[in-house]
Image: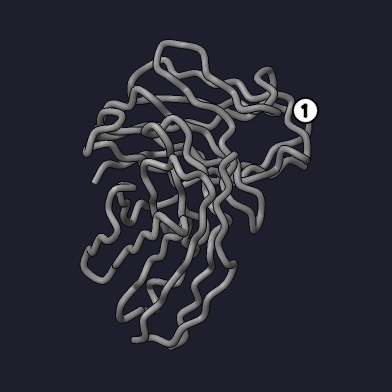
Amino acid sequence: GAVVSQHPSRVICKSGTSVKIECRSLDFQATTMFWYRQFPKQSLMLMATSNEGSKATYEQGVEKDKFLINHASLTLSTLTVTSAHPEDSSFYICSARAGLIGQSNEKLFFGSGTQLSVL
Amino acid sequence: GEDVEQSLFLSVREGDSSVINCTYTDSSSTYLYWYKQEPGAGLQLLTYIFSNMDMKQDQRLTVLLNKKDKHLSLRIADTQTGDSAIYFCAESIQGYQKVTFGTGTKLQVIP
């Protein structure tokens, strides 16, 4: 099946630094990628929807200046956590959509996630 | 708004069947999914069902959808230790523009 590569899988950084997380679709073109955040023992919360070549759409309550999303190509989206603080520590997961919206071949594939720990 | 609920924990013996339940509130859901998350990993799509179907079977997995009660279930036949994971149900409306996930059910398989 389709593969979405996300890295790094784990990152520890000091408070105030920025961290970049990459999400790549390896064998398909993804016009849309999604970024989620998962708190311990909780479900995934959609942070933003990233469309290739356009600005990301952020969910309510997500600071777009803090969580910078770039989707410069059909196979790569990046999430940069700027000036990270301990409360940003979380598990971040990306996903990429394959196929056409509303069609039977539409599927959503997930990366393996990035555990961010801010000291 | 959308709301998807699941029980948090399920324990079964190896070889038995597991049934994981999910309820959702939005009657306009188009697709309903089951994802599996192993420790430290991302989500793996197990199966999905269109809202105009009431059952889908795929090898050991059977998905039942009761649209009237807004209830979705995943049955895993002959559960194995490798099935131990967290299972998320999810719904989406109008394709994949927004997917709402349940809280996840942790399945523990006892040898």
Residue furthest to the top:
A54
According to the picture, the residue beneath numbered tag 1 turns out to be A16
Q: Secondary structure at mark 1?
A: loop
Q: Residue at x 54, y 49 (%)?
A: B25
Image location of residue A69, percent across then percent down = 54, 21
The image quadrant of residue A84 is top right
Residue B110 falls left or right of residue A60: left
| Amino acid beneath label 1 | Gly
Left or right for A57, reference B48:
right
B45 versus B22 height, above or below: above
The quadrant of the image that shows the N terminus of chain B is top right
**Residue visible at 34% across and 47% down?**
B51
Q: Nearer the viewer, residue A72 or B23?
A: B23
| Position of residue B13 in the picture relative to residue B25 (left or right) | left
State which quadrant residue A16 falls in. Answer: top right
Give the image location of residue A29, x and y in percent.
Answer: 28, 26
Examine the rendered structure and indicate whether residue B18 appears above or below residue A108: below
Q: Check the residue under mark 1 and report the chain it is in.
A: A
- Residue A58: quarter of image: top right
Residue B85 or A43: which is nearer the viewer?
A: A43
Residue ranking furthest to the front: B68
Q: How is the image coloured?
A: one colour
Residue B34 point in image, percent of width and height? 39, 56
Between A93 and A108, the residue placed more toward the observer is A108
Count of marks overlaid on the render? 1
For the point 32% across and 63% down, the residue is: B63
Query: In the rendered image of this protein, does residue A98 appear above or below residue B86?
Result: above
